[in-house]
Amino acid sequence: MDEKQLQDDLKKRLTKKLAALFASYLFQPEDMENLLKWKPMVLMLGNYSSGKSTLINELVGQDIQRTGQAPTDDSFTVITEVSDQEGARSVPGATVINDEEMPFVGLKAYGERLIAHFEMKLIDNAPALSNLAIIDSPGMLDSVTEKNRDYDYEGVIGELAKLADLVVLMFDPHKAGTIKETYDAIRTVLPMSAMEDRIIFVMSRIDECDNPGDLVRSYGTLCWNLSQMTGRKDMPRIFLTFSPTLAREQEVHGLRIDERQELKEKILATPKLRLSHILQDVDRQINALQLTIEAMATFSAQGRRLARKGLSVALAVSLFLFFFLDIFVQRFAGFPETSFLASLLSGEVVARLLLLPVAGFMLPLFGLGLFLSQWQIPRLAKRHAAQPEGLMELDTPYRKGVWLKVRERVVELIRATRLRDLLFARHRRNLAKIDRFLTRDMQEYYGKIR
């Protein structure tokens, strides 16, 4: 079974076994559906002079994107090989984002301004892109000194990073990680959207350093800035590259640096990462669902304990009233002519004598329902909505990270829970389904890609 067949099979199995669960716990179905659509993707990020377009043109083997040290493009551009008979062309953003067969439908939420700055380029004679798409992005800005955009740029790159199988973040020696949007992307956006193994760092245009000392200073500055942004002491690898067509010599400053070819090979090998990426993200979303259900199971269990305590008292009162309510009514109101208990002891039970006993039996239960639904359960929900962390143990960094993503969803579910939902919830059974899928189905797919 090839990668495409595995992907289709995984999609069918997810839809059959877990789609209903995702929907019932307020997970957006398109988050999973978009992940399984279309082809492998590489997202290119960096400031406007970092060499993104030059590298893309080199990968494609054609001058597709304009290059230059000044800003040349302010749009997100999806570049891939044409797959129909209509030939090379540019497809407007509105067409791309509204196409249900494409994974970009979620970008509609970012408004008309983004759509006007989004397009797709379908090109001929690009074998490298037959099963790959490259997303070129607008150069990152320094929001302190440059005009802000009219759409949520960080939100958009976060959505695209979720879809991408590889994120290439490029820098140049003159702005080695000092751009404000770069800082926000590395510090906040990318950690929430892409796994670390899907992000690679590149410092390009190193041939523009005047001497080895400038190169070392630029590299050191980038390492320092990355350590501040990522909060890590152990630095990821940084590819050092230059454009062979622009470099003054192949040996830059006496150093034989040939990492550009390795970088290109890594980018073009992205399709091999596709299924692994899908499984990682599916695993992550299923774990997020699992943590959500765990929290709701604990909340429901506490609510049911309150209900059981109240029910034991209510039943005792109900039984007492069932047998003795009509006796009190008879004493103070003069009817009925005989009580249900007396008729039962005499062996002559009359159906109409059950009216008051049944009413007496039901009254405490009805009161209990009102007390729980109007007082105890709302109070319990309010307490846990304010501090939902008390519903579970966040004993590992991974669980803490997942919790940050589902916390607000859990709060929303708690606030929406009614007494009937709480009493008849099937959270424990749903957790068993999740466990079976993780231990059987997911392990089966991981085994197939090893």
Image (tube, rainbow, N blue to C red):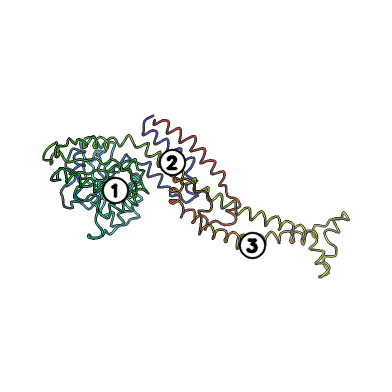
Is label 2 in a helix, a strand or a loop? helix
Mark 1 vs 3: CB contact within 8 A: no
Is disc 1 surrounded by few (<14), some (14 to 19) or many (20+) residues within 10 Å? many
> What is the quadrant of residue 33 in the picture?
top left
Residue receiving disc 1:
226
Is label 3 in a helix, a strand or a loop? Answer: helix
Which one is nearer the viewer's eye here, 397 or 109? Answer: 397
Which amino acid type is marked by label 3? Answer: Phe
Is residue 198 rendered to the left or right of residue 257?
right
First-in-chain label (3 vs 2)? 2
Which numbered disc, 2 or 1, marks the residue that appears first in the sequence? Answer: 1
Disc on res. 371: 3
Q: Is residue 157 above or below residue 130?
A: below
Point out the residue furthest to the left here.
Answer: 248
Q: Is residue 379 left or right of residue 67?
A: right
Query: In this image, 215 relative to 343: left or right?
Result: left
Question: What mark, if any, has residue 283 been given in the picture?
Answer: 2
In space, the residues marked 3 and 2 are separated at their CA atoms by 41 Å
Q: In whole angstroms, how far apart are the C-alphas of marks 2 and 1?
A: 28 Å
Identify which residue is drawn at 47% across, 35% down. Answer: 441
In contact (CB < 8 Å): disc 2 and disc 1: no
The image quarter in which residue 207 lies: top left
**Contact, mark 3 vs mark 2 (Cβ under 8 Å):** no
Nearest the eye: 232 or 356: 232
Q: Amino acid at mark 1?
A: Leu
Lateral position of residue 415 relative to residue 47, left or right: right
Circle 2 or circle 1, nearest the eye = 1
- Amino acid under label 2? Asp
What residue is drawn where x is 42% and y is 39%? 11
